[in-house]
Image (cartoon, helix red, strand yellow):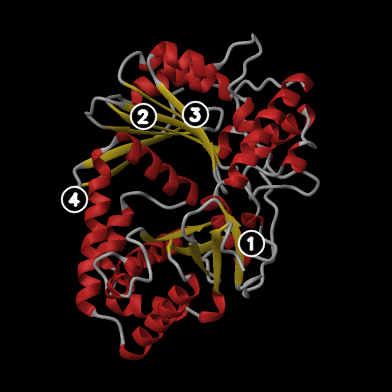
Amino acid sequence: MKPAVEVFESQFLGERYYRAVHACGLPIYVFPKNLSATHALLAVNYGSVDRDVGIPEGVAHFLEHKLFSNEDGSDSFERFSAFGADANAYTSHTKTVYLFTATDRFADSFGELLQFVTHPYFTPESVAKEQGIIGEEIRMCYDNPYDRCYYNMLEGLYHRHPVKNEICGSVKSIAAITDKTLYACYHSYYRPDNMALVVCGNVTLEEILTLAEEHLPKTADHTAVIRPSVIEPDSVHRSRIVTKGQVAKPIFAIGVKDVNVPEDANARAKRDAGMAILSEMLFSESGELYNDLFDKELISPEFSADFALTRGFGFLQISGEADDPDAVLKEVLSFLDRCRREGLSREDFERCRRVEFAEYIKSFDSTEEIANTLLAFVFDGSELFAYADILRNMTFEEIKVLFNEFFVPERFTLSVVKPNRQIK
């Protein structure tokens, strides 16, 4: 029996994609795009923040590493290479993604993707070997000053939320992981209805459904996925964290904690769009703040702002390089206070909304970007094409309200990594 198919279409963009749910419960999204490369990803709605009591930190990332090893001793990375595909995987705070890009032999790579992700194989010996490999990765990340600056910022922002914990875990935490731990977490979260398959490229829905049928289970598991809940205070945990590292000049990350994360997915998408526009207005290289900081020689050219929002948490990160990060924070707060007193510019709003809309349209030129953006909307519960209407309908009044509600000085934290020789 063929699954029912939903069609999502944007007349404005001239694009469409399809959604069908396989009998096993796996949602399948196919975005036909007549480009040379086809990008496919199989993702699990499971990341480092989804950690049950008693489960060591870093299990989601550990699982990502181990799934490429198969029961027959083969390595799926090597198989992808033999097919001529470029494969990879990553674990974030909220999801785990297995992916590949192919220009030839797509069916072979697609079958491999579904096969190895749905057939786990762990042994005590293979887990012990992987602990050494991941332990070395953790030490490298700890020595990376940019990673340290980022995680220290999260440590400053959050009291209890697990987003503050490193995605890879620690050398100590992964030492507690066993093959039984991996199997338990795999069966809790790697369920078809807690996953999504997204394909974008020169393919049809019928092709993908036919190929998927060859590799997916025939029935669904109806056990509910239970996610741990966290009560997180509105206040920041620490307002300033300074450490030292291998940098020639101090680097910084200013974090702003979002304490009003909407439960409704569409409201989150609107808030995300609003913060994208606000970030462009306030922190872009064409803006007043950047030029003031640069003219005063307070920052290097590399200065950026990124907003992250998903289920349960959100934060703005303003990062760069500066001789005196505290002076940068002071200038940022002073600038925001002046914007609050004098008001935002309607002209800036209109310009930045057009910039964000242009970036959104441009993203449809790449199969990889389409697939990853579509996945982000799928896992957050909103719809890709609806984002265009959100941007078009955003009002200056809504942006002013968001600005005044979000930029509260008490919700800021400053993370700094200074050169080894200069730390005080």
Cα–Cα span, label 1 and label 4: 43 Å
Give, as a three-letter code, the residue at label 3.
His
Left or right? Give the position of 163 relative to 101.
right
Q: Quadrant of residue 96?
A: top right
Along the polypeptide, which appears first: circle 3 or circle 2? 3
Q: Is disc 4 placed on a helix, strand or loop?
A: loop
Left or right? Give the position of 345 relative to 223.
left
Q: Which mark is residue 39?
A: 2
In which quadrant of the rendered image does the C terminus lie?
A: bottom right
Badge 2: residue crowd in 10 Å (few <14, some 14–19, many ≥20): many
Q: Looking at the image, can residue 64 be seen?
A: yes
Badge 4: residue crowd in 10 Å (few <14, some 14–19, many ≥20): few
Q: Is disc 2 placed on a helix, strand or loop?
A: strand
Q: Looking at the image, can residue 217 be seen?
A: no
Residue 393 drawn at (x, y percent): 27, 67
Along the polypeptide, which appears first: circle 2 or circle 4? 4
Give, as a three-letter code, the residue at label 1.
Glu
* Residue corresponding to mark 3: 22
Residue 262 drawn at (x, y percent): 51, 66
* Residue corresponding to mark 4: 12
The one nearer the camera, 385 or 323, is 323
Along the polypeptide, which appears first: circle 4 or circle 3? 4
Badge 3: residue crowd in 10 Å (few <14, some 14–19, many ≥20): many
> Is 247 located above or below residue 85 in the figure?
below
* Residue corresponding to mark 1: 155
